[in-house]
Amino acid sequence: MALSKPWLSKLLCFIFSGSVFCSLQAQQDTTQLQEVVLSGALIKSNLLKAPTAISFVKASQTQASAAQLSLKEYLGLVPGLFAQNQYNYNQDLRIAIRGFGARAAFGIRGVQIVVDGIPETTPDGQGQLDNVPLGIIENIEVLRGPSGALYGNASGGVLLINTLDSLSGQKIALRAMGGAFGLATHQATLSMKEKKWTTLLHYNQSSSEGYREQSNFLQRLFNAKVGFSPSDKAKWVVQFNITDSPYAKDPGGISLEQALENPRSARAANLTYQSSEEIRHIKTGLSHRYSWQNNNKENTTDIQSYLFAAQRDFTGRLPFKNRGISAFKRDYFGMGTRLSLQAKGQTLVGVGHAQQTDLRSRYFNEEGTKGALSESQEERYLNSHAYLSHRRDWSAWMWSGSLRYDHIKMGLIQDGNYNTYHAFSPSVSLGYSLSKNQFISFQYAQSFETPTLSEVANTPSGALGLNSSLTPSKTKSFELLYRNKRNIGTAFLSLELAGFVSESTAELLPYELEDFPGRQFFENSGVSTRTGLESSWRLQYKNWEWNSSYTWAHYLFKLAAEEKLNGNRLPGIPDHQFFSELKLSLLSSLTISLEYNYTGSLMANNNNSVSIKPYHLLNSRVHKDFKTNWGSLRLFTGLNNLSNTTYYDNIRINTFGGRYYEPAPTRNIYVGLEIGV
């Protein structure tokens, strides 16, 4: 039986919120509120009593009227998460959670990505989102901070993306959209369901001329998901994805003077050398789940396994001649299985292995044309791991603990020179239910992050090889969490507050060299600290819904490699973020959303000599549904940057020559139509 202590509730309320939410403690817990069940921490838990900071995103709440061009459209309400590079499709979306991942030159670093139970992040820790089918996402679980340790090579957290198994009440969905700057997308989704089988086929083509010069792109994506359930106890799922992006051009970073004078301009060298990338990505996966119950259904056993293989062909043109075209053919695969036992608590045991091989080549860039081969090498990364996790509940208390071990080898195949690393990642949580709708927990965890093959292959000389001076970074994290949910008359309120402190050693940060502009090199930065408070709340009243999140965080160099940096802010991450969405749903199937986003100042370089000003951003979305005799029809539109704010879509950290700035689009609109039968 949960022990409700009014003095403790009031104290926590004062510590965490100190104002408006304190008055809610007087409300009685009179209603059983529906709870979301999460699997992100591997041991299933409802959202209220999950012993770690985790956010649940129901994609359908955004998907209906979203442009579906970037995962950032879904993640605005996640506290502690900062996303950049939404409009530069050459370098993909960059996501940082609690400051981890901000250093990424392209794609995602420091954050693991898992799609439908299968890792999307490569074994060496490099993630990309260009092959994720945004149009059929069902929900997203975002683990922020310590719990990411259970997934291995990640310090910041985990994105667990789950896609649809079938369309609800439809067999075919067609979607078309057009917008400013030559934007055009076309989608087709086919859903088939028969007894024990489900099949979902999805195709998407997107293209745009881009807001800036030299920023156009074209992408085609096909995704297939086939499920087979021979019984209530077992399920098999086969996945296949192919993504083809024949071009995604890069306008490059420009100086502040250029950004203010002509924000749509591209860097001259990027035009001369036709900076762009070409990608072809193929991935297939097989997953299986089998569960059974014993002892009068009191004990449950569950086995889940996966197997996947992927190939990524990449060619990138950088804005210089010598070794200015970088290409790699990447093959990687992985497998894993885990056993879950539910008897006197929940216990999870898992093992896995993943392997990656990159054939990396560099050519001369003859003003956009591939010239002579300069150098090539074959690199390999291997990871074998095992983990154990246990959770036990006693009355109002809960305890959970986890331990993961990773054995890693990375190096050059041709000379057999491998670096070997061993990493132990422990975590422990203690939680307490203040009442049936209030929960508090404390967590401690250790995590690690190795450099990727692309990072160690960029040696300070500019030549291929291995930068043996780079070492893995390690992080220790503490987290205090509080959740509250309740009915207030006919309204519903949910609240999450989290405070965190972490310390990282040997953290990797990027820099550029004059001879190789546009190519990023890396160095270990000593010790850095991260301290922050995160809050998110959701208030529903009749046909109104208000969702908001606020993050205050301080990311600092503590014992930097360069002593003069001690006390400086880590670049590329704001100290303050606020996101708020107000949604009105009318009986006539009309939904109107208004979004407000405040991003505080951030630093562009380690020296903190360049500060990027804060900005305010307003977006709006509207969609209207119609029911017909033959199916459904949806009209939707979105207006971005309503106030025509001048801001920057991306800041290139520690870039050479002051070219930090990538201006974001001015006010722009998109409109679309979706048909379902």
Image (spheres, grey):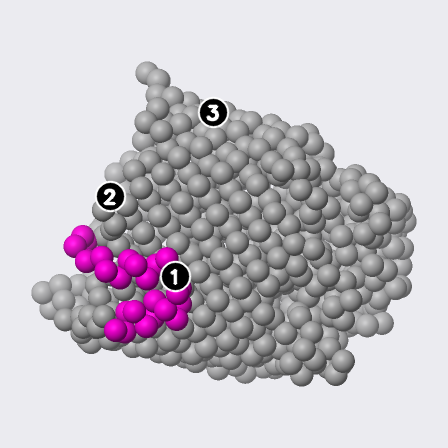
Vertical arrangement, residue 518 with respect to residue 99, above or below: above
Q: Earlier in the sequence, mark 1 or mark 2?
A: 1
Residue picked out by circle 2:
490
Residue picked out by circle 1:
19
Vertical arrangement, residue 441 with respect to residue 60, above or below: below
Name the residue rendered at 40%, 76% in the picture: 443
| Magenta highlight: main SS | helix
The answer to which of 239 and 436 lies nearer the viewer is 436
Q: Quadrant of the C terminus?
A: top left
Name the residue rendered at 9%, 65% in the picture: 296
Magenta highlight on residue 398: no
Q: Earlier in the sequence, mark 3 or mark 1?
A: 1
Q: Is residue 510 left or right of residue 53?
A: right
Name the residue rendered at 48%, 48% in the picture: 580
Hey, what amino acid is under mark 1?
Answer: Ser
Mark 1 surroundings within 10 Å by alpha-carbon count, few (fewer than 14), some (14 through 19), many (20 or more):
few
- Kindly indicate whether the residue at mark 1 contacts the one at mark 3 (C-beta within 8 angstroms): no
Q: Nearer the viewer, mark 1 or mark 2?
A: 1
Q: Is residue 650 left or right of residue 288?
A: right
Q: Nearer the viewer, mark 3 or mark 1?
A: 1
- Kindly indicate whether the residue at mark 3 contacts the one at mark 2 (C-beta within 8 angstroms): no
Residue picked out by circle 3:
635
Name the residue rendered at 28%, 58% in the picture: 24
Real-space Cα separation, disc 2 to disc 3, in angstroms: 31 Å
**Residue range highlighted in magenta:** 7-32
Real-space Cα separation, disc 1 to disc 2, in angstroms: 22 Å
Find numbered disc 2 in the image and state the secondary structure of the residue it sits on.
loop
Hey, what amino acid is under mark 2?
Answer: Thr
Mark 3 surroundings within 10 Å by alpha-carbon count, few (fewer than 14), some (14 through 19), many (20 or more):
some
The answer to which of 388 and 475 lies nearer the viewer is 475
